[in-house]
Image (tube, grey):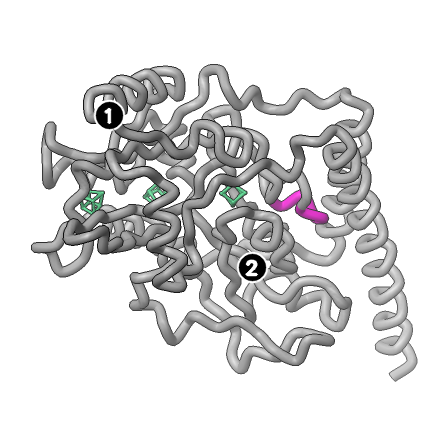
Amino acid sequence: MNNKRGLTRRNFLKKGAMVTAIGAACAAGMVETASAKSGTYATLIDLTKCDGCKNEPVPKCVEACRRENEKKFPDPKKPIKDLWPQKTHDDWSKKRDVMNTLTPYNWTTVQKVDMEGEEIFVPRRCMHCDNPPCANLCPFGALNKYSDGSVVINHDLCMGGAKCKAVCPWHIPQRQSGVGIYLKLQPIPAGGGVMYKCDLCHDRIKKGQIPACVEACEKRLGMKKPLYFGRRDAILKMAHERAKEINGFIYGEEENGGTATIYVSKTPFEKIDSKLKEAKSNLTMGKVLNPLRDVNEWAKGFLIAPLISALGAIGLAFYRRKKEGKEEGK
Ligand code: SF4
Ligand code: SF4
Ligand code: SF4
């Protein structure tokens, strides 16, 4: 479980300083970030071919994802204290079986959209954006965009402040309280758990394997599968060819500045989006612009993140000294 690998306060201070330094270096344009467009991987999701695994007890992609990531799921320390000062917390640990939405224990879900007599099934998970606001605006540098295209949360560094969820156009990351480094830092007013989401099977890609969900879907449907994984250029080419063939539409190529999760559908995504909104789904498919598209927003992101990180480290040092003083005076 991730909390077994938790950081000590001393390590956190060191990492905080490191994040600050990296942030400052980024602001000065000195650190090379992953090139999001070249050599990265992507997934194609063909909505004309997904049947939602209707005849299966659980969609195969969902089942495979849960099995693959089980060891990364949170194991919260009970009782879970309320966050400070919000007087609330997020606890999915008693709802681990929930599969019809994204949770810390369910990183992909399949939505059913009733479209004038026709059912469309939409597998959903992190889009792995080319220019991810979640990673660029996390105050603690807990998310990274890797050169393989994946956007991954470092569960050891995440404070669960949910900034990533707030800035994500699809609100993908989900929080579990009672786990993670924030427990060692209370009552510092930051965080409240750890955020979880699909990591594009980053560890499997490193080993030359395809994502578990893609593999499971392929095992079930063979060449009729709706999920494809490959180099982003090839996936985009495939998406355009398929869209031309079915006179259809593409989602994910431009959204939020481009992503590594590309959908193709014969129904316009505006229609799918309005049906999802009608059904009050919290996972919609609207046209979204990247909040970091503006150069000033970029600068703000780069400058604010290290600043908050530095303030966090100072606050932490102060709290630590105060606590140690108290312990000595016992
Ligand atoms: S993507 Fe494949 S495994 Fe997932 S619901 Fe669709 S058909 Fe089933
Ligand atoms: S979809 Fe959301 S969580 Fe995923 S990379 Fe993009 S901004 Fe981050
Ligand atoms: S890529 Fe991996 S982590 Fe993401 S939904 Fe598929 S199986 Fe889950």
* Separation of residues labelled 2 and 1 (CA atoms): 42 Å
Q: Residue at x 35, y 68 (%)?
A: 96
Instruction: Report helix, strand or loop for mark 2.
Output: strand
Mark nearer the viewer, 2 or 1 = 1
Identify whether 254 is placed above or below 13. Answer: above
| Residue 303: % across, % down | 81, 38
Q: Is residue 105 visible?
A: no
Between 319 and 189, the residue placed more toward the observer is: 189
Label 2 crowding class (10 Å Cα cut-off): few <14, some 14-19, many 20+? many
Q: Residue at x 77, y 67 (%)?
A: 188
Circles 2, 1 touching at the beta carbon (< 8 Å): no
Q: Is 227 included in the stretch rendered in magenta?
A: no
Q: Is residue 246 visible?
A: yes
Between 247 and 163, the residue placed more toward the observer is: 247
Residue denoted by label 2: 194
Identify whether 190 is placed above or below 284. Answer: below
Identify whether 245 is placed above or below 198. Answer: above
Q: Residue at x 23, y 48 (%)?
A: 121
Q: Is 139 included in the stretch rendered in magenta?
A: yes
| Residue 327: % across, % down | 84, 77
Between 155 and 290, the residue placed more toward the observer is: 290
Give the amino acid at mark 2: Val
Does residue 51 appear left or right of residue 4 in this picture? left
Residue denoted by label 1: 247
Q: Is mark 1 within 8 Å of ligand 1?
A: no
Q: Which secondary structure class fits the magenta region best?
A: loop
Give the amino acid at mark 1: Asn
Q: Which residues are magenta?
A: 138-142
* Mark toward the start of the polypeptide (2 vs 1): 2
Does residue 82 appear left or right of residue 298 in this picture? left
